[in-house]
Amino acid sequence: MFSPSYNPLPKMAAIRQTPLSCSGHTRPVVKLAFSRLTPYGYFLISACKDGKPMLRQGDTGDWIGTFLGHKGAVWGATLNEDATRAATGAADFTAKVWDAVSGEETATFSHKHIVKSVDFSKDSNQLLTGGNEKLLKIFDLNKPEADPVVFTGHTNYVKDALFLPDGKRLVSGGDDKTIRMWDITSQTEVKKLDFDSIVTDMSLTKDGSILVVTNGRTVSFFNADSLEKLKSYSTPSQVYSASLNEDKGSYVIGGEDFKLYKFDYETGSELESYKGHFGPVHCVRFSPDGELYASGSEDGTLRLWQTNVGTTYGLWKCVLPEDAIEENNGGNGTNAVKTEG
């Protein structure tokens, strides 16, 4: 029986982060999205300038398939609630919907400019798009031939557009240095927030309660229902993406300096930082169980990082320092976490 003070890992300081690198893309990875937890685990989709979005097993990064059909860089990608559908937006002026099980394309929606953002409604019956048209559009996936519902107001390119959990409102942000909330029924803007620089990323926590926004050298957190600012912190360099863990304990950011940072959500103090990419980090997202976070970079790779370094999870196996010494035939025991596969 362990005493309360017993530490099964007395040399935790020796444990270092060992990210899993997922190759396959040939150009910068610009967007990532995880599915929710499903009976088959969870999944990860990546958008890349090579025009070939990829689907992977979320906890291991193992490649499942590539969606083939776009004729230009893919800027946006997402999965629906149960990971049965995928959507992508691209520089070929189209948004596409895919059967995520078979990989078959099921719908194509033409636009007049580059599509940067795609998002499914909670019931997967609608697709929201945004991009260089400076418009938001909602397409009815049960009537793909019907004209979309259009929202006008942005004065520059739309970077991200999302359905809010109530299914009655949207939120969007972009190059006009604003975030806007919209009422779907009336197709009107109901609130606008102004920023001092371009909004580089916008994401909702999985429970839909907090909106995470990056711009310049700042990451901000807003109540997603009211757009009331909850917290705002400065970042070490130009920040391109951020994600808040579901337990609201920590958030991660990535940006211009190639590094991944993890901070305490309540205090904003830095907890960890890692350098693994060989180019700016364009996107970061926590997995739905919070056990890892994924990053996509200008270097053409996506990497998976453990939230709690040293635990056994996915392809990571925790090895006690003395076991590591034995396995390495007299090694120094500092490589206390190894990956399998």
Image (spheres, helix red, strand yellow):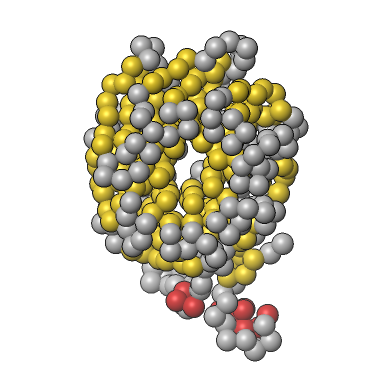
Q: Is residue 242 above or below residue 163?
A: below
Quadrant the C terminus occupies: bottom right
Q: How many numbered discs, if any?
A: 0
Q: Nearer the viewer, residue 154 or 180?
A: 154
| Residue 150 located left or right of residue 124 | left
Q: Locate residue 143: give its quadrant.
A: top right
Q: Residue furthest bottom?
A: 330
From the top left corner, tell me how far across and down residue 209 is, in percent.
35, 35
Q: Nearer the viewer, residue 247 or 110?
A: 110
Q: Nearer the viewer, residue 61 or 307?
A: 61
Q: Residue at x 63, y 53 (%)?
A: 27
Q: Residue at x 54, y 80 (%)?
A: 334
Q: Locate residue 176: give its quadrant.
A: top left
Q: Is residue 20 above or below residue 9?
A: above
Q: Residue at x 54, y 56 (%)?
A: 297
Question: Is residue 213 at all visible to an observer of this figure?
Answer: no
Question: Is residue 31 at all visible to an observer of this figure?
Answer: yes
Q: Is residue 310 above or below residue 241?
A: below
From the top left corner, tell me how far across and down residue 87 is, in percent.
60, 31
From the top left corner, tell me how far across and down residue 237 is, in percent.
36, 61
Q: Residue at x 47, y 15 (%)?
A: 149
Q: Is residue 33 above or below residue 97?
A: below
From the top left corner, tell me how far across and down residue 205 is, in percent.
41, 39
| Residue 108 located left or right of residue 173 | right
